[in-house]
Image: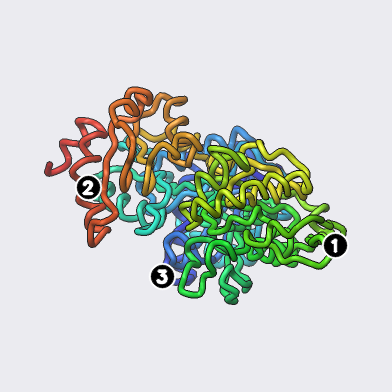
Amino acid sequence: MIWHYFPIGMRFPVRDFSDGTKRACWKIALSAVYASDPRGTGLYEACESFDPVTESPVYTCIVCYVGIKQSRAAGKTMHALDRLMTRLCLVNPLVQANWLESFGPYPILAEIDADGKVRPNETGAAFLPTEPVVPMQPSNGFTVLLAPDSMKGVCNAETLTRVLGTVAAEQGLRVVRMPVADGGEGTVRTLIAGTGGRCETVFSEDLNGERVQMSIGVMPGHIAVIEAADAVGFIRKNEATPPVGQRSSAGVGRLIRKTLDLGYRKIWIGIGGSLTTDLGLGALYALGVRFFDAQDAPVEPCPETLPKIVRIDTEDLDPRIRKSEITVLYDVSAPLAGETGALRVFGPQKGASPEQIAAWEPEFTRLAVLLGGNPDAPGSGAAGGLGFALASIGGALTPGADRILERIGLGFAVREADFTVTGEGSFDAQSLRFRKAPVAVMERLSEGGRPGCLFVGKTGLDTESLLRDHPMIKGIVTCPKTEEPYEDALVRTFTRAVLPMIGKDVAKQTDL
């Protein structure tokens, strides 16, 4: 028999992994399965792990069906159940197949036959529920989807959804937490949480030359995810950080090599949130590409040394790169040069002066010819030209927001929700121009005809025109990042400004 593997799972925060805890989790999971009335056999699997979103132990129950119809029915039923104190993880239930051998370290515990009888194996018999399982009934409760990006500099997207979700749940709402990202900081956390993945840690050097712990996300299908922000991003900035003219993206190349060393050949690289503007040459240098001056002496690339480079040799590029599938997730669709390019728009944000920008941009254009490729391709200018550099060695430039939202199933979640809250720390003209994550969420609201609102730290836009152009956005709520303590400000703002938007029935449940 060939198993078509459509995993649908629930993740339960737990205090311990005792048999009693496992039986309780499985009772809830199995009741949801029976409520969906699957007609066919399936497999049950489980895993003990650590949830990077809640930063606590979790017990994951995975249900694998043979057919697409069964997985669709179970997915809808699980979404409709509001008595489950769980965080749902649907792993592309209608797309992926035959993942049984590569999904992850989930021991197979039992089978279910067409009559709904569970046949546990020796391992599963210890903690599958011994008492009869009573199917739970779907709820008609009002569902709020929380799908924001991070409030940079104040709190990450996971913290934001936790705080807002607690407030919404206290008002009797069903809450679905689905933090989003677009290729910048938080990409790894978002993808492993949204796909039921896991996290591996490695030690590597950052842009300060310090050996630090970095994260590699692992999604189903043996796909690794890494972030430039983790290697050379703002989160690494400290007193030892070199001035902008001496910063190198080599940390990204080193992290790629660490990922290859672990055996991964499908790698997603989120390149947003970097502090570098070296055309990505530092990353190529760490991967084996060599650069030479007019006297054929080697040059270690950084913005200040770009004028010295006259020859590029790719002969020693790590051969594993050519045998790998590299997906480059860019957070901004900027070209390499020009008015909307890497240096003129984002250089000042990283500390580059007008004089430095004027000196480095011609070098970007000159060296782009030596590397080969299309400097006008969207995303080429992301991360100070890192997008262009990775594309020159075979990476596929991809809009991060679209790929990530598709992977975590946000479109399905938007259609199932009654109201969606999205946003980010600073929502401005660049958010719209470069299609940041909240804009991608807004597009899906428009496509599905579903209402929502923006929850932001600040906005530099004309709100009237924004609401006119996006009629499914019912309001823009601002919680300034200067408010302290910020979590209290989030609660206060959400209660006063967001809850009344989601309908008369919900508003009546509040004390407003």
Q: Is residue 340 above or below residue 278?
A: above
**Lower sequence index among marks 3 and 1:** 3
Q: Is residue 248 above or below residue 347?
A: below
SS under mark 3: loop
Q: Which residue is mark 3?
A: 15
| Amino acid on which the number 2 mark rests in the picture | Thr
- Say which mark, if any, is on residue 381: none
Q: Which residue is mark 2?
A: 493
The structure residue drawn at horizontal position 17% and vertical position 40%, both measured from the top left corner, is 509
- For marks 1 and 2, give the one nearer the viewer: 1
| Amino acid on which the number 1 mark rests in the picture | Asp
Q: Residue furthest left?
A: 511
Q: How far across and down, in percent of the image, does residue 23 sit? A: 47, 62
Distance between mark 2 and mark 3 Cα atoms: 32 Å
Mark 3 closeness class: few <14, some 14–19, many ≥20 residues within 10 Å: few
**Lower sequence index among marks 1 and 2:** 1
Q: Which residue is mark 1?
A: 316
